[in-house]
Amino acid sequence: RRATKEPLEYRICSLLLGNLLAERLNDPAAAIEVFEELASLPPHLAPATPSISLQKREEAEDEDRWWGVLGLKMAGYTAEYKMNDPDRSKSCYERALDIHRKRRGVALDPWLVQALARTEPKVSKAQLLFDMAYEKYRGRDVRAALKLYEKFLAEYPDHELVREALFRTALITDNDLRDYDAALDLYNRYLVKAVPRQSTWKLDVLFDWGRLDEVRYKIGNLLALHRKDPVGALKAWSDLSAAYPDSYWAMQGMKDSILVYRESLGDENTAQKKMRDFLAKYPESRDAQIFRKDLAERLLGRQDYVGALEMLRAYLDHSLPSEEGYLETKAEWRDLLFRRREAELRDRMAAAGLRDRFELYGR
């Protein structure tokens, strides 16, 4: 290839060399460089003086373009199938198409059109915009992410990711920008616009509720912590529990309502009632164990030994012997049981006759 002085021989050698590198020597990167060189002749092979004939000059130009298109096609094909590099192959195909369009009297090459279609991104513009917003958020540029999410909502209002974009705009405004008034408006916007979707399976009557339950919980949390509106928070969590009784966020709302009654409203009786409601609804949860211990301590403080024994027994029934604190709680339960039995005997002895005393001691 270096020794020849004929353009045709140079081009044929280039094709053969590129094919050898790609197929036999497994060096597709070098093969692509060789194929791309066909787009133009090296200076020492270019004609010294162009022909004075316009027709011959046009024929020579068309031949150069034909070889350039062929070389770039092969370069793009190698990049696509040997290197799995769609960006490199797309660049080659686009250059080949540009050269092909300059040829005279030829139709559009359908092979190049199909090849370019294969290298197009497999995701839609909407998906790219959503992903761009997510990457901005990952890079902690939260304001840019918020603008991109809002742009996505404006340009693609019917896209399947609209509900997620609505949620993320509210979450960014709440957690990152800490603009709680605006966040409350955005959470309410989600409740209005995020319509539940029925399952696409014909036999399925379930609905995809999106994040409606989580948004209701976050509205209550925002009202309780930042707007200092405990009554509004309790209503939000009550509505959540009624609408989505099996939701994880309903459980969280019910748990937080206990804290609001106790600390914000100072209503200990209602707080303890809510604890018992929680135990009845979520008996196996970890928080239920915390509430059982809490209630047992408060019942002991009121000398309600029967109620305390029931709570401690329930705690043990929902624990494993290997868990931390199990043995101490069991010892506490036994001690309390003994003290209760002792108190019962003392009460009976005080009012018992001789025969009753004999029966009591006989036991």
Image (cartoon, rainbow, N blue to C red):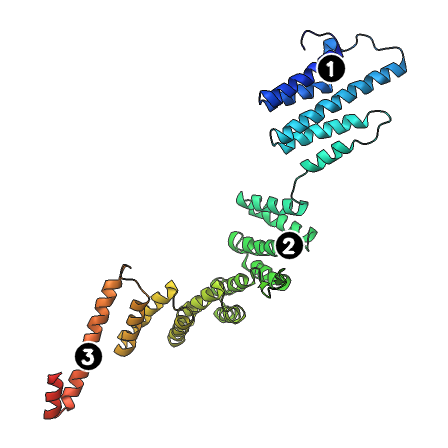
Placement of 123 over or under 49, stated as above or below: below
Report which residue position mark 3 lands on: 341
Left or right of 342 in this view: 60: right
According to the picture, the residue beneath numbered tag 2 turns out to be 160
Asked whether 286 or 173 is in front, the reply is 286
Position of residue 255 in the picture relative to residue 13 (left or right): left
Quadrant placement of the N terminus: top right
Instruction: Please tell me which residue lies in front, 45 or 114.
Output: 114
Q: Amino acid at mark 2?
A: Glu
Q: Earlier in the sequence, mark 3 or mark 1?
A: 1
Label 3 packing within 10 angstroms: few (<14), some (14-19), many (20+): few
Residue at the disc numbered 1: 41
Q: Residues within 10 Å of mark 2 (few under 14, many from 20)?
A: few
Q: Are marks 3 and 1 in contact (CB under 8 Å)?
A: no
Indicate whether 141 appears above or below 269: above
- Camera sees residue 297: no
Q: Locate residue 205: give its quadrant.
A: bottom right
In this picture, residue 137 sits left or right of residue 71: left
Across and down, in percent, residue 91 comes to 68, 29
Image coords of residue 112 (percent x, y): 74, 32
Tell me if residue 126 can be seen.
Answer: yes
In the image, residue 68 sits, relative to residue 225, either above or below, namely above
Type of amino acid under label 1? Leu
Under mark 3, the amino acid is Arg
- Write down the quadrant of residue 64 in the picture: top right
Position of the C terminus, as image quadrant, is: bottom left
